[in-house]
Image (tube, rainbow, N blue to C red):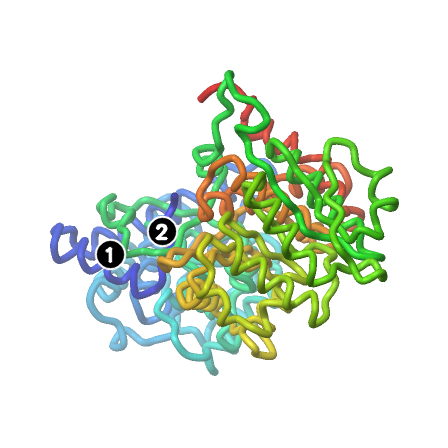
Amino acid sequence: MLKVSTAKEMQEIDRVTIDKYGMAGVVLMERAGLAVVKRINELFFLSTVNRQPSTVIVLCGAGNNGGDGFVIARLLHERGIDVEVYMTAGPAGLKGDAKANYNAAGKYGVRIFPINKFMAGRGQRTKDNVIIVDALLGTGLSKEVRPPLSVVIRKVNRMPAPVVSVDIPSGISSDTGEVMGCAIKARCTVTFGLPKRGHLLYPGAEHAGRLFVEDIGFPSGLLVSKKIMVNLVRRVDAVSMMPARPRHSHKGTYGHVLLVAGSRGKTGAALMAAKACLRSGAGLVTIGIPGSLVSAFQPRVTEEMILPLPDRGDGTLSYEAAAPILGFMKKKGTVLAIGPGLSADDEIARLVVLLVTGSKAPVVVDADGINAIAARPGILKKCTAPVILTPHQGEMNRLLREPEVPGDRISTAVSFAKRTRTYLVLKGAPTVTAVPDGTAYINSSGNPGMATAGTGDVLTGMISAFLAQGLSARDASVLGVYMHGLAGDIAVERKGMYSLIASDLVREIPNAFKNCRITGTNR
């Protein structure tokens, strides 16, 4: 998988590359500039879609990000492109490689001005045919952007010109994706070596625009270091995790999922989760439902089976359902999934706690199951089997007993997973999966059309299916999240963002597998 770094981790890669491997910093800066110029050339000077700019404005800060900007300006100038550089610091404020490249740009004839000239309007004389290169601030930003730099950023954002950001849009935290007061809104961002967390977490991802990750010569061993604990999940990773389908297999090979779900008025959640589970390859699925709802469920199930359970006569499960559920799991069950449409009250909460702590098979907990655990999070340490929790933000707030999830979603997820020894799927844009050893996975599939009722129930079914087929809790979670998002991406092409509903995802699960070229042959 592609690693995703923090600012500190990337700085260490940079330092080791220079100190241990003998790669001069000025060479890395030159390669960074070449990489950005290559993308500018592809996007604006070779494109048949975009009008070719007559002027490139490069905004340079005082640090190494500004040094990259001087390289970019020099290289563009040498290609005959009209370039103007505007500096936020005077020459005396530059040092090291940035100073060397400032001097080189001047000697090559690049026109360099103080930033006040840009603020006075010089850079807008060609209003419709200009691009801006943002080399103001790099990945080391740790405090809020203030005037006069914030004034420059706001002016750039008001201009119609497309912006190419170098490494990360100025004003975005590279570790959390937060806007540090104000931030550049780029059309694209060119970064080096590895993507940073802030490129993928919102609102940073929206500010970054299209992301290009360029190789500028860092040793490959540093880029795959196990010390970097966050990974980006892409299609190639999903394909590599997919469980095999041996030719001599049968339905028992692919596990039996017991889905404890549904209550009066919430039968759809259980049905969608069950159908998604079957569509994702589970061999057998039984839905454990309140006994009084059998007549409501029976006409709507085909391949699924039903386990009537003791209820309280109002369409909700009784605490007495624990014995038949655990008995079923002991005899037949491979995976226990709890939560979709279950309803929430104290008796349900006690039932969920008993099931989660008593199951010897892996457990997936969603929706009302999570709400039941939120009042008793300490019980998670008593579980003997792997537990996967799939909260959305509101449910995560309740698990943490905080009014809202802190801005650093990755650290929040990792901390919780390590503390409770669970597998946490923190749903959102993007979904982050954290595992007990402190590793985290950022999902790359999915879209805003999926922000609709029931999509979480579909995810529960998909993760349960991959568990039933023998994947580890980690792989089942990561693969389930990716394939769920991919089904959503396929569905949105057919239905659009506004009209997408959860059952559309279930219908597109087969196409998601086809998209990954998983045909069922023995691999």
- Which secondary structure lies at badge 1? helix
Against 188, residue 283 (above or below) is above
Q: Residue 352 or 461: which is nearer the viewer?
A: 352
Q: Is residue 416 left or right of residue 343?
A: left
Q: Is residue 303 left or right of residue 80?
A: right
- Which secondary structure lies at badge 2? loop
Q: x, y percentage for residue 58?
A: 42, 60
Q: Calculate the distance from the C-alpha at mark 2 to the C-alpha at mark 1.
A: 10 Å
Quadrant in which the C terminus appears: top left
Label number found at residue 328: none
Q: Which residue is rendered at x = 46% and y = 77% of the image?
A: 149
Q: Residue 329 or 152: which is nearer the viewer?
A: 329
Residue for badge 2 = 194
Against 515, residue 53 (above or below) is below
Q: Which residue is rendered at x = 37% and y = 60% of the image?
A: 438
Q: Residues within 10 Å of mark 1 (few under 14, many from 20)?
A: many
Q: Is residue 223 left or right of residue 492?
A: left
Against 240, residue 153 (above or below) is below
Q: x, y percentage for residue 325?
A: 64, 50
Residue 161 in view = no
Residue 519 in view = yes
Q: x, y percentage for residue 356?
A: 55, 59
Residue for badge 1 = 13
Q: Which residue is rendered at x = 41% and y = 68% of the image?
A: 419
Against 269, residue 354 (above or below) is below
Three-letter amino acid code at disc 1? Ile
Three-letter amino acid code at disc 2? Leu
Between discs 2 and 1, the one toward the N terminus: 1
